[in-house]
Amino acid sequence: MRAVKGSFPIFVAEPSFMSLKKLLLAGIYLCFFYASRAQQPSNHDWHFKDPSTDSIYGIALNKAYQFLQSKQKKGRPVIVAILDSGIDTTHEDLRKNLWRNRREIPGNGIDDDKNGYVDDVFGWNFLGGKDGKNMLKASSEKARIFHRYKDKFGDFVIDTQQLSSQDKTHYYWWKKTAEEMKGSPDEENQLRFIAMTQRTLKKYDDFLRRDMKKEVYNIDDLEKFIPTSSAGRDAKLGFLNFLRIIEASNEVSNQQLLSEINRELEKMRADSAERTSPPNDGRPTIVQDDYFNPLDTLYGNNDVMADLEGAMHGTHVAGLIGAVRNNGIGIDGVADQVQLMILRVVPDGDEYDKDIALAIRYAVNNGASIINMSFGKSYSPEKHWVDSAVAYAEEHDVLLVHSAGNESLCLDQKTKFPNARLEKWNRTANNLITVGASSDRIFGPCLAADFTNYSGQQVDLFAPGVMIYSTQPGGNVYGKHDGTSFSGPIVAGIAALIRTYYPTLTAPEIISVLNNTVTSLRGTSTCLPGAEKNSASIEWTALCKSAGIVNAFQAIQAADVLAEGKKIKNAVKK
């Protein structure tokens, strides 16, 4: 999605530590210079805690490992494919656990394994060109559809009875996008307001960098800084409380904040421009595939990071699943015996259906048993390609984990893509699990994240997604971010843990285990995502099917029982 968007409150492929609502609220603060103080928890691994013993709604991971140790389980490595924005392959906490295509000789320019992809050592970049160039930005799918069919449908009275089946589908999509592309005065006002907020923060930042003699600073630095003038006090108080209102972690720097606001402003300006002008699509000049030809599949390159800034989202996701455990540095991933396959399919903007479909097939064909998909969007005109790939993964018993999204939407009322519904076959895939984002009372009274999408029918379970600490690109760097983009990989990591130690369990069985062993919140309520603070509540049964938060310990216990039962049953048959 463009606004996760992935899994993030604002972007799918770009890391975001604020939602648009928080950004607007903080902008209002700047206008009125309202001061508010909130303490930030510094617990980097809160999501591993055990609700029953630590009184924190984590996933009870340490207890799961203790159980496996008591059973003297050995396990075997599993491959997890990460369909995302790219990954920093040089990171100290990821290098050892990257998947390597042993059938490919690195750097020789030859397709040694004859799979059609040259030097695909760590995976593949479906957003690259054969000349090594990479597509970094893309428009919204909404704009692509609207302008693609505008000349065909825009200025005519359409009799749908005269349209072919294919044209009826195209017209349906075009009508939907045409309504949304009209925009609203509110959106234009928000654009102007955020531009004003950006200018004010930039003014404060210019002063603070000069006065502090620091180009990069964070909340801790600001708190220690003693201004010597009223202008300095204004700049410190304004910048510091802005960071607090958006609930940024102490690690967030001035550069990160300004970069995030700039990206949001650019996105809003692009959305505004797309209403009247076709989007600047770099795919024909960079990727150079025949997009609407599903048989044109051998495009892209092997640059799976592509861009340092763009790789932020994917690198953060990768660390949660498979950062090297117990190495004394950085963080521990959820899974202990995992190989991370990198498939770059998410630009800064909406992903393309064709890339998603081909990446799923690549993952299946190259041995992945779990696929993490921390992205999504509101339109999917080539959904049949993605559905076919999901069904292909289903046939090969590959489990897909998808993040629910970050727009505070009920997915019963607004569909997001991809999803488990296979329209061509009029059924639901049994190998795809959808994950919402949970929080904990250390961050406030609400156990459901304010930004998370939800549904008692479309979302399976929740997992921690607030202030999640993980790997970041650009050196051996770590930091915190919010989003269902990070709830998904936590569940993918637990699924990988189950597949490592209980390889006889099928994808549907693992999904059943995860859903039936949650920390149950059935019979309780929490804050309605997206509502004004504490103004509305919702029962957990309306948030997700399982009415709870994933629990690794209880899942491993249940997997052990199920696997042992299958073993006995098979022995009796023999």
Image (cartoon, grey):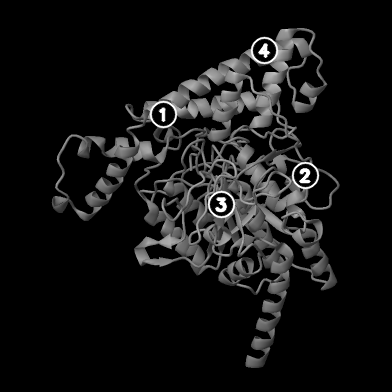
Q: Amino acid at mark 4?
A: Asp
Near-viewer residue (231 or 294): 231
* Distance Cα–Cα, label 1 vs label 4: 30 Å
**Label 2, on which residue?**
44
Q: Earlier in the sequence, mark 2 or mark 3?
A: 2
- Quadrant of residue 261 in the image? top right
Judge whether 131 appears above or below 387 on screen.
above
**Label 3, on which residue?**
537
User: Within 10 angstroms of label 1, few (less than 14), some, or many (20 or more) residues?
Assistant: few
* Distance Cα–Cα, label 1 vs label 3: 26 Å
Q: Earlier in the sequence, mark 4 or mark 3?
A: 4
Q: Which mark is residue 206?
A: 4
* Local secondary structure at mark 1: helix
- Residue 262 in sight in this render: yes
User: Within 10 angstroms of label 3, few (less than 14), some, or many (20 or more) residues?
Assistant: some
Q: Residue furthest top?
A: 229
Query: Of the residues tagged 4 and 3, which is closer to the observer?
Result: 3
Near-viewer residue (539 or 427): 539
* Residue under the point 74% across and 32% down: 251
Q: What percent of the width, then of the height, locates residue 219?
A: 75, 27
* Distance Cα–Cα, label 2 vs label 3: 28 Å
Quadrant that contains the C terminus: bottom right
Query: Of the residues tagged 1 and 4, which is closer to the observer?
Result: 1
- Residue 366 in sight in this render: no
Badge 1 vs badge 3, beta-carbon distance below 8 Å: no
- Quadrant of residue 539 in the image? bottom right
**Label 1, on which residue?**
186
Q: Amino acid at mark 1?
A: Asp
Q: Amino acid at mark 3?
A: Ser
